[in-house]
Amino acid sequence: MSTCFHNSSIRARAALRDVAALRLEGRVVGLSGLAADVAGLAGHLAIGSRLALHPRDGDPVLAEVVGFHDGLARTMAFGSLQGLGPGAAAVAPARRRPGGMALAAPATLSPCAAWLGRVIDPLGQPLDGRGPLPAGTHPRLVRAAPPVAALRARLGPRLDLGVRALDAFTTTRQGQRLGLFAGSGVGKSTLLGMLARGAACDVAVLALVGERGREVREFLEDELGATGLARSVVVLATSDAPPLLRREAAHAAMTVAEHFRDQGQQVLLMMDSVTRFCLALREIGLSAGEPPATRGFPPSVFAELPRLLERAGPGLEPADPAAAPGHITALFTVLVEGDDHNEPVADAVRGILDGHVVLDRRIAEAGRYPAVDVLRSLSRAASGCLSGEETALLRRARAVLALHADMADLVRLGAYRPGADPAVDEAVALAPRLEAMLRQERDDMSPVPRAARQPGARSQPPQAPVGISSIDAAFAALRQALTLPGDADAT
Ligand SMILES: Nc1ncnc2c1ncn2[C@@H]1O[C@H](COP(=O)(O)OP(=O)(O)OP(=O)(O)O)[C@@H](O)[C@H]1O
Ligand SMILES: [Mg+2]
């Protein structure tokens, strides 16, 4: 699939074809690292303008303006700068402004329903070998601004995610944005696949930013599968793609999600990972001449990050009060290595989003998947959508798990004498039941815990009628886990 990144020349030509009348032409005057400086166009360009750089021989390569200095436009390319030298032509498609001045056109994408089931690159070209991608009727700005805050709809009702640990412990509302904090190999891709297949959304949009090429097919075929893919649009830029393309993947996925949201649909956007998006921004910022500020990240990273994340969430309040607004419910993966949850990207993301899910390596190593550390995970919008009884159940479950975590070592070493403290005895009895409730195999997307459904299991399965909401089923499982045989009322 990475071959597609070498096709930027074809795309550049396609972009040029669209320019009917206006064509701005400048010259490449300098090349350093990943950047090319263009003279003669600065007055007609803006940050984000696209142009095609023409090597003396070979196909043009698409580039984008990332900064200006000394009257020159600094650009970075979506492909390789190989073959370019001083004097190469830089051509920008342009449109005329009302005042008569020519300005290079901003990037757009035209998503439509036919994009469902497709894997595309950040410039809107198909990567799945399944033929051309039809274009929708309305081009949308790839770097659109978030909707005006005061005119946005409020968060919707709770959204069934189909993963018990999240449904109960980080109950999520339509339009909520969560961070998924995890190290490598603790089950992020598996969890995202489960959500793409099982969540009660109309459309899933996946942005795979900086993913290793080798793992892409595995993810598409094993985790997403035909069912997940059928209602998804996957936007992909692998780790070998130039930084501009990796950044574009995040914006392009957001643009696709906005298209479906603005049609009143419930969209689940999953971005893996926002850390690699920030690393791409860092490469771009440093190439544009910005100074590194926070742990090597230039300031523009922390200006662009909220602009991206704020685009997710509820859409504008519909004019017709009877119409239901669309939402982008979003999950942004943040890579945390060595338990460093305070590195700058994690910090910035936590401040912007409405909750976080933490995947813990020790839990994964102990074999409990999904390895959600429920004590460290939180949905800030949950309180607005839980009943009093559900809140009480959660409070009790958290207290039991916290006490058990505190006492586990003493119990294991035999330093705790059963009977010494009734609360500890209860935690020792209940914790394994809660762990069993949290455990969920990747293919087990039914709302009822698998163990509880096995014939001969000692406890009765929760009474979950067919079609029950997965959140209700998760709380039924929690209620049951907290009810020891013989208890009349657990809460
Ligand atoms: N729900 C699950 N049930 C069973 N096993 C799981 C589950 N989730 C993850 N695993 C196991 O954990 C392994 C790693 O999972 P996964 O590839 O999803 O992690 P990752 O965080 O995406 O890794 P990377 O950082 O390498 O991308 C899987 O190969 C699988 O064996
Ligand atoms: Mg992965």
Image (cartoon, rainbow, N blue to C red):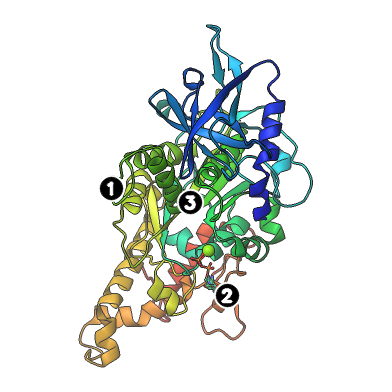
- Identify which amino acid the numbered label 3 is placed on: Leu
Indicate whether 238 appears above or below 459.
Answer: above
Residue 455 image point, x, y percent: 62, 83
**Front-most of residues 1 and 92:** 92
- Relative to 490, 241 lies left or right: right
Q: For label 1, count other residues whose C-alpha is less than 10 Å away and answer few (under 14), some (14-19) or many (20+).
A: few
Q: Can residue 152 be seen here?
A: no
Whether residue 250 is visible, yes or no, is: yes
Side (left or right) of 10 relative to 437:
right
* Type of the residue with mark 1: Thr
- Mark 3 lies on residue: 331
Q: In the image, what residue occupies the spot 62% across and 60% down? A: 216
**Element type where label 1 sits in the image:** loop
Q: Which residue is mark 1?
A: 294
Mark 2 sits near ligand 1, with its Cβ under 8 Å away: no
Q: Position of residue 92 (x, y in %)?
A: 59, 25
Q: Earlier in the sequence, mark 3 or mark 2?
A: 3
Q: Please state which of the two labelled residues, at mark 1 or mark 2, is closer to the viewer.
A: 1
